[in-house]
Image: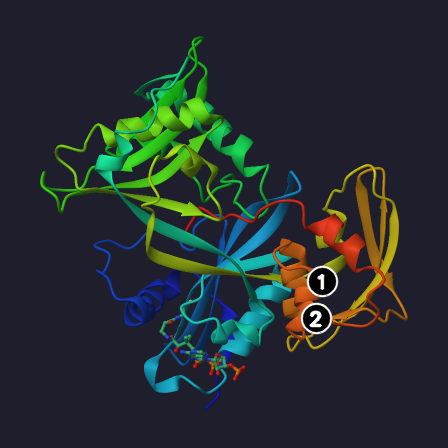
Amino acid sequence: METTTRRLTLDDWPEAVRLGLEGFGGKRPDASPQAWPREGQTCWGTVVDDRMLARVTGNSYGSWFDGIEVPTLGVAGVTVQAEHRGQGLLAPLFRALLDETDAPISTLYPTAPGIYRGFGYELVGTLRTVEIPSVHLSGVRRPDGVTTRRATEADLAAIHACYTRWAAEQNGPLTRTGPLFDLADTLTWFTGATVAVDTEDHVVGYLLWHRGTGYDESSTISVDDLVADNVEAASALWRVLGSFASVVGQVRVRTSGDDTTRLVLPTAAWREVKTNPYMLRVLDVPRAFSLRRSSPALRADLAFGVRGDRLGLIDGDFSLHVADGEVTCAPATGADRVYTPAGIALAYAGVQSSANLRRAGLLVGPTDDDPTWDVLLGGRPFHIRDYF
Ligand SMILES: CC(C)(COP(=O)(O)OP(=O)(O)OC[C@H]1O[C@@H](n2cnc3c(N)ncnc32)[C@H](O)[C@@H]1OP(=O)(O)O)[C@@H](O)C(=O)NCCC(=O)NCCS
């Protein structure tokens, strides 16, 4: 069978939709788009004659690491036609998609991690949906100096700024900038966008929520975003949700990692009802690491290698120079501290210590530099709040 792997265009849209529906279900779109792929997306497919056998989409995102935006290729819509699964069609598709991107890292939400491990991705975080009985939220302490009001269009920039203040202090969250994000939809998409404001009406937190249906114990409010600058804002926003206790049984919140807004809740009830694991791979070691920042107190010269990348993108030896808060990474030779692609992904995300990477067989070589690596990359918690 003679297959072609190529970039998809608007003419391929009907076949791409057919394959997408086959993989993920859903409703056929009513009308074909004027332009496809969307700005900020690239789509690749494996085609025989007019038939599409496999497809993948790459989204141009940015992720926060050390307060710096790291360009990120978000991979989505991976599908192989049922009769052609297990034939290795994904490897050339991934190679084509990853070869053409400028982004130094790539991320995705796997339906099964085993699909992507061979392509160098590893699990670094989880988007979580948690459920809290609404009755507990009305018991949150009354805030001091912060009130809430319904957001208007004039608040959208302040809402995004509030998200950015939080996201830039974590590792991993998307920057929510670029053509794939449209702030203007916020007010129509949600039942309510609620802002927490200080005494000068500055936005210090916000809540984006869908009311759901019904008004009995089975009724549920879904919150896509709850972000707060401080405990007063967090309390004010939880109390808005708690005010529904007479008509809503539970509140579902999309969250990740150890959410500090949880610390104002009087209850331990915080039940995970859905998890979406998230994987990352490094695509360009010198660029990815040169975008990192460190404590100005840290000075170090480190050498390391990466071996075992089946896509052949990042195998090699590298040097890392850390001084004055900046990190510079360049190709080098002769490193005896060696990561697997999964090891370097976990180290980059800062979610595993060197000792744990060794335990998992993802890092070998001398241990002398382990404490320096752990300080360099381990300072911030990993979070992700956007599903794609
Ligand atoms: C997932 C899917 C794309 C895999 O297609 P495929 O043709 O089996 O992929 P390939 O033959 O190219 O195999 C790629 C790798 O994935 C692994 N893999 C495939 N399906 C897997 C599964 N369900 N669980 C774990 N690993 C799996 C293969 O073993 C192979 O790994 P290896 O090279 O290390 O052995 C296909 O089954 C599909 O379209 N499923 C429905 C939609 C879906 O789940 N998409 C993924 C969204 S994140």
Please tell me in which quadrant of the rendered image residue 237 appears: top left
Q: Is residue 68 left or right of residue 153?
A: right
Going 43% across and 55% down the picture, which residue do you hit?
37
Residue where numbered disc 2 is placed: 358
Residue 93's spot in the image, x, y percent?
52, 73
Please tell me in which quadrant of the rendered image residue 149 appears: top left
Residue 103 appears in view? no
Q: Is residue 118 left or right of residue 180?
A: right
Query: Label 2: how many residues lie within 10 Å, few (<14), some (14-19) or many (20+)?
Result: some
The label on residue 354 is 1
In depth, the one of 220 and 83 nearer the eye is 220
Mark 1–mark 2 contact, CB under 8 Å? yes
Residue 169's spot in the image, x, y percent?
59, 37
Whether residue 224 is situated above or below residue 366 in the rendered picture:
above
Across the whole image, how many numbered discs are drawn on residues? 2
Which kind of residue does numbered mark 1 sit on? Ser
Which kind of residue does numbered mark 2 sit on? Arg
Quarter in which the N terminus is drawn? bottom left
Quarter in which the C terminus is drawn? bottom left
Going 32% across and 26% down the picture, which residue do you hit?
194
Distance CA(mark 1)–CA(mark 2): 6 Å
